[in-house]
Image (cartoon, coloured by chain):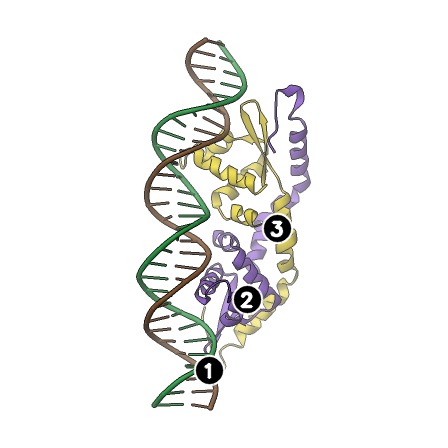
Chain colours: A yellow, B purple, C brown, D green
Amino acid sequence: MNDVFKALADETRREILDTLYAKSGQTLGELYAPYAKSMSRQAVMKHLGILEAANLVAIVWSGREKRHYLNPIPIHAIQDRWIKKFERQRMDALAALKTALEGSEPKGKKHVQS
Amino acid sequence: MNDVFKALADETRREILDTLYAKSGQTLGELYAPYAKSMSRQAVMKHLGILEAANLVAIVWSGREKRHYLNPIPIHAIQDRWIKKFERQRMDALAALKTALEGSEPKGKKHVQS
DNA sequence: TTGACAGGTAACCCTTTGGTTACCTATACT
DNA sequence: AGTATAGGTAACCAAAGGGTTACCTGTCAA
């Protein structure tokens, strides 16, 4: 799961996933197009390689074309095994935070740092 | 939001959030304890600094002690503004992926790469 | 069969990151 | 007042990251 978090840490890679979300099965050439002015094809290839290694993208070759398919499973795994937990007690945590922030400056003995 | 993804990309930092989830309001010393054998207090401090910068953790000083509180909002934001979308069409994406994988090796003309 | 096209490999470069050590500051305790 | 305690700063380091350029390979179409 660490690979997935690492993969998602990069803006470009998240954009690529968004692009594949909009239309799965795109080739490297197609995925590269939007970045043609900002980075090399090889750079995009590296990003796709990382997404592939994290299993976020599955590859299907057809002839000389490589098609990229979004695999939603790892994202779901993160949602399910990690985020869900924090989501569950969100209000509790917020309440605790609020209380802590409130009770933190009486009588000048304690002080908060924004 | 990029800061949040970056912050979550590190295993240690995710562990720290887990620790704060279990018990919010811990001091640096307390949070450092589990890592005492594997890394320096300063290293843990840096991680906390990154979590703080990403607004995942809020600080309250009381005397010479620094209390760390989990802030669940950024995690919720990621869940809501990013993951939710993928979650929504999960089955569609999986179906498309499955179809692509199936239709990819007839007549030896096409081949799949695991 | 040859050339254009889709993609891959490798070496290299600079910056960021995660960690270290050494030393400093501020609060609390006695 | 003096010392232990909680935390902070700074300089430094090796490795990982994101990118580049140059060149190679495999497939399609004329």
- Amino acid type, callout 2: Pro
Total marks in image: 3
Residue B16 to residue A58: above or below: below
Tell me the amino acid under the disc marked 1.
Answer: Lys
**Foreground pick, C2 / A26:** C2
Badge 2 density bin: few <14, some 14–19, many ≥20, Cα 10 Å: few
Q: Are marks 3 and 2 on the same chain?
A: no
Which residue is under mark 3? A78
Does the residue at mark 3 contact the one at mark 2 (Cβ under 8 Å)? no
- Chain under label 2? B
Compared across the picture, whether A35 is left or right of A79 comes to: left
Number of other residues with Cα within 10 Å of mark 3, as a class: few under 14, some 14 to 19, many 20 or more:
some
Task: Tell me, yes or no, if residue A18 can be seen here.
Answer: no
Give the structural element (helix, strand or loop) at label 3: helix
Residue highlighted by disc 1:
A109
Discs 1, 2: same chain: no
Residue at image mark 2: B34
Would you call the spot at circle 1 few (<14 residues within 10 Å), some (14-19), or many (20 or more)?
few
Q: Is residue D12 above or below residue A25?
A: below
Identify the residue at horizontal 53%, vertical 68% (top origin).
Answer: B31
Kindly tell me whether residue B11 is visible in this rendering: yes
Tell me residue B106's x, y (percent). 67, 22
Determine if marks 3 and 1 fall on one subunit.
yes
Q: Nearer the viewer, mark 1 or mark 2?
A: 2
Q: Quadrant of the C terminus of chain A?
A: bottom left
Q: CA distance from mark 1 to mark 2?
A: 30 Å
Where residue B7 appears, as percent x and y from the top left, is 50, 55
- C-alpha gap between disc 3 and disc 2: 24 Å
Q: Work out how far the residue at label 3 is from the one at label 1, CA to CA, in angstroms.
A: 42 Å
